[in-house]
């Protein structure tokens, strides 16, 4: 299908429908990267420059030929020890303490279907929709072999990459760095767009010029983190939403990671992505292999919107699995912001009844239902229902809630333990702690050593008893601190540098068991909001709580940043009470619904505290969400304003695949009188079609809507939008009415 080998040019070319990726077996067997961009035929060997350059050494086997140096070649997979002084993807410590590795091409072949990676999430594909290119590199000295795997999704315009590093020597080797992606672009000037943040403000986009310094983003926290997201974009200097080259890299991994970009002395830009190397010291015995997690790559020559759509499609179709893929998720109400851990049976049933009467479909019992968990200082690890608090067994509670016509959801945080818990008292060595050092506490909890399968299984078995009893329709899997004191009691001195990686494998093992045993259950990922919002997690959990910040205005920026790499159906988003618990801001009820409707939609408040007006509003909001759902989660998502920069309004829209319907949402960030004369230019419509604003009956051509836009004011039902007012406009192709 998509791989061609040109025996005379010695190029291996991957084609997808609209992109081309080329590598070349260069002099002395160096595997070179020559091109990744818009689809084309041809030999890109000319991008590689040869010449004698000072202080760039030559491989020994080149003899007197000084024109070849690993220091300047665009390499397909870089390593430390071959004369390349740039940051390298692979670093192997030899038994004698040196780090010397020199990888050369050995062979390649193509396999039908998409490879998978043991114990790790990866993009899946039917045998007919994907193929795998395997390129084998061998170390000149004979210590390691590296299998570069490429998953080629022709129709989707996606190429995945992964590495398998094998010790082919007779002695132990140590991996000090083992990135999954190494991409050298010998041409072009690039910006790096990455997504930084913190707890309660995740995935804020930042665009940096890639110069001659090395820009490194990543996480050392044991989770992908609030602070940086394992999704980055390299964009041309003038690339915007609709124009210009850009490529995205999404790491399907939920643990510590790093991503580095920089231009070298002769302007080649190198992008690296992989597991965090600072804490890595991974011992490989003879014959053993290390599997690097997968990076999914996509390229667009037509700007950031198209790139986002490629990732939205990839994640919706080939990452998310199970029965909840492409299905509207139940409109839920979550107990957390309404009552914290202060509840009993009467309160829960009262909330369930009130919610049912408003049209809500599921009650989610958040933190506080187990062990001695009445505040966040105790109980984690004791996954037995607190029957006194619940007024009976959890099975009976779930039954009563179901009897009211609601689904039932439950919160868990399996990776954690409080010192004040029976689990910790029985097994203090199950927590990550360094002998002789008191561990760092966060939220007064410690982290269980999920690198140990027996601990993962013990926690799973405890939880399975509860889940078997109450059979939740939905599970919120949380993780509320960063890892520290990373020492595993059973690992031994030589293996402590593997624990962070093995911990993440433990989390995946837990999730594998969950999805196998409860295949119908919808799982929502969470880590203090969006601290583990990554494509790896989405392989198990079709949605992830975006942020603990539910302020509708702050959410606009969080969701805007999230939209670059992740589809709206994955964004856990709820309407919460005002003044907002996080920001103190009061935003109109309708605006909170418009913002939450961009994501999965639900409520996070006490219906007993609502005004009659608000109560009357909820069924209408739910009806609107259900009506718009096919558009919202199956349509194309367009960013209409730069939420990070536009201080007047935030706007986005979704367009049906056939462009016959669209929903435009706008939130006024400023008062309407300051926006007089402001328009919201639409995108993604058919320029020649006539569209009708369904509410006002106003008619516009697609060109009018895209070139000028909808006037703020007349279209949104307010003469003057007040600050934080929101409006939604449903556009329908006029002939279809
Ligand atoms: C995290 C989650 C919240 C809530 C609390 C419960 O902070 O993000 O939504 O579940 O934990 O402790």
Image: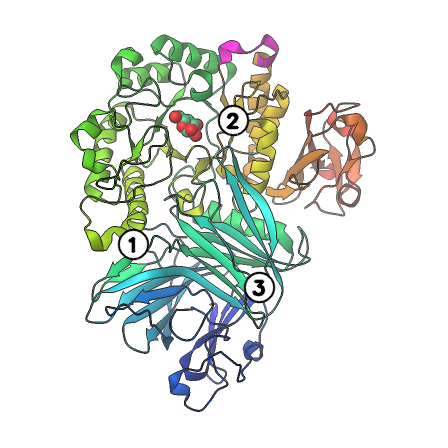
> Which structural element holds mark 1?
loop
> Which structural element holds mark 3?
loop
- Tell me residue 628's x, y (percent): 59, 31
Say which residue appears at 29% left-offset and 60% top-offset: 290
Q: Disc number at residue 118?
A: 1
Q: Is 312 part of what is drawn in magenta? A: no
Question: Which label's residue is closer to the chain start, 3 or 2?
Answer: 3
Per the rendered image, the range of residues in magenta is 606-614
Q: Disc number at residue 212?
A: 3
Tell me how far mark 1 sits from mark 2, CA to CA: 35 Å
Q: Who is closer to the viewer here, 642 or 307?
A: 642
Question: Which label's residue is closer to the chain start, 1 or 2?
Answer: 1
- Tell me residue 387's x, y (percent): 26, 14
Q: Who is closer to the viewer here, 361 or 35?
A: 35
The crowding category of the residue bearing disc 1, from other C-alpha atoms within 10 Å (few below 14, some 14 to 19, many at least 20), is few
Q: Is 607 part of what is drawn in magenta? A: yes
Q: Are marks 3 and 2 in contact (CB under 8 Å)?
A: no
Question: Which label's residue is closer to the chain start, 1 or 3?
Answer: 1
Disc 1: residue Cβ within 8 A of ligand 1's nearest atom: no
Above or below: residue 552 compared with residue 651? above
Above or below: residue 398 compared with residue 21? above
**Coloured how?**
rainbow
Majority secondary structure of the magenta segment? helix
Q: 188 left or right of 449?
A: right
Quadrant holding ligand 1? top left
- Tell me residue 135's x, y (percent): 38, 71
Tell me how far mark 3 sits from mark 2, CA to CA: 43 Å
Disc 2: residue Cβ within 8 A of ligand 1's nearest atom: no
Q: Disc number at residue 574?
A: 2
């Amino acid at each position: 299908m998509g791989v061609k080998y040109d025996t005379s040019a010695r190029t291996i070319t991957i084609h997808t429908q609209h992109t081309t990726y080329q590598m070349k077996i260069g002099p002395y067997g160096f595997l070179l990267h020559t091109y990744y961009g818009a689809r084309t035929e041809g030999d890109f060997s000319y991008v590689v420059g040869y010449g004698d350059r000072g202080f760039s050494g030559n491989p020994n086997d080149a003899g007197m030929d000084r024109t070849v140096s690993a220091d300047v070649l665009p390499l397909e997979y870089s390593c430390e020890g071959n004369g390349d002084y740039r940051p390298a993807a692979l670093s192997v410590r030899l038994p004698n303490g040196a780090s010397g590795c020199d990888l050369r091409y050995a062979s390649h072949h193509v396999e039908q279907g998409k490879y998978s990676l043991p114990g790790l999430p990866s993009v899946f594909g039917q045998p007919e929709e994907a193929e795998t290119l395997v390129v084998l590199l061998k170390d000149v000295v004979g210590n390691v072999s590296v299998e570069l795997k490429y998953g080629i999704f022709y129709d989707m315009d996606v190429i995945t990459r992964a590495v398998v590093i094998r010790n082919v020597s007779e002695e132990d080797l140590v991996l000090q760095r083992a990135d999954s992606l190494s991409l050298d672009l010998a041409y072009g000037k690039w910006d790096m767009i990455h997504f930084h943040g913190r707890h309660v403000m995740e995935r804020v986009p930042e665009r940096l010029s890639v110069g001659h310094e090395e820009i490194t983003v990543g996480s050392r926290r044991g989770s992908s983190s609030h602070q940086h997201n394992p999704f980055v974009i390299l964009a041309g200097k003038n690339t915007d939403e609709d124009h210009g080259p850009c490529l995205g890299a999404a790491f399907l991994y939920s643990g510590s990671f790093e991503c580095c970009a920089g231009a070298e002395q002769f302007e080649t830009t190198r992008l690296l992505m992989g597991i965090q190397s600072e804490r890595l010291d991974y011992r490989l015995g003879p014959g053993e292999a290390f599997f690097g997690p997968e990076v999914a790559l996509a390229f667009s020559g037509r700007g950031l919107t198209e790139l986002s759509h490629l990732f939205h499609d990839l994640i919706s179709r080939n990452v998310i699995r199970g029965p909840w893929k492409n299905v509207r998720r139940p409109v839920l109400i979550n107990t957390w912001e309404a009552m914290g851990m202060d509840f009993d049976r009467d309160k829960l049933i009262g909330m369930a009844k009130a919610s049912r009467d408003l049209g809500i479909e599921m009650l989610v019992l958040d933190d506080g239902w187990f062990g001695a968990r009445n505040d966040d200082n105790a109980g984690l690890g004791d996954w037995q229902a607190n029957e006194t608090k619940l007024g009976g067994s959890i099975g009976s509670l779930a039954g009563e809630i179901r009897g009211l016509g609601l689904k039932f959801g439950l919160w868990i945080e399996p990776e954690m333990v409080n010192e004040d818990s029976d689990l910790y008292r029985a097994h203090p060595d199950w927590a990550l702690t360094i002998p002789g050092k008191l561990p760092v506490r966060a939220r007064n909890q410690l982290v269980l050593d999920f690198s140990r399968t027996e601990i993962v299984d013990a926690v799973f078995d405890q939880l399975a008893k509860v889940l078997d009893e109450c059979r939740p329709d939905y599970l919120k899997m949380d993780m509320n601190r960063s890892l520290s004191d990373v020492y595993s009691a059973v690992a031994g001195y030589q293996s402590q540098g593997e624990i962070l990686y093995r911990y993440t494998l433990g989390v995946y093992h837990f999730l594998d068991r969950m999805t196998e045993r409860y295949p119908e259950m919808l799982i929502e990922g969470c880590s203090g909001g969006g601290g583990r919002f990554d494509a790896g997690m989405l392989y198990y959990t079709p949605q992830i709580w975006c942020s603990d910040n539910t302020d509708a205005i702050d959410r606009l920026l969080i969701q805007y940043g999230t939209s670059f790499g992740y589809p709206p159906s994955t964004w856990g988003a709820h309407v919460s009470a005002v003044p907002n618990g996080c920001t103190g801001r009061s935003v109109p009820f309708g605006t909170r619904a418009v913002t939450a409707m961009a994501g999965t939609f639900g409520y996070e408040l006490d219906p007993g505290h609502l005004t009659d007006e608000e109560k009357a509003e909820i069924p209408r909001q739910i009806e609107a969400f259900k009506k718009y759902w096919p558009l919202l989660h199956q349509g194309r998502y367009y960013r209409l304003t730069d939420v990070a920069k536009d201080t007047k309004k935030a706007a986005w829209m979704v367009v049906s695949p056939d462009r016959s319907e669209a929903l435009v949402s706008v939130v006024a960030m400023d008062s309407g009188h300051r926006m007089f004369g402001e328009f919201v230019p639409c995108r993604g419509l058919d320029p020649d079609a006539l569209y009708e604003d369904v509410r006002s009956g106003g008619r516009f051509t697609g060109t009018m809507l895209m070139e000028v836009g909808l006037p703020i004011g007349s279209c949104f039902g307010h003469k003057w939008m007040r600050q934080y007012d929101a409006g939604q406009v449903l556009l329908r192709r006029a002939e279809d009415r």
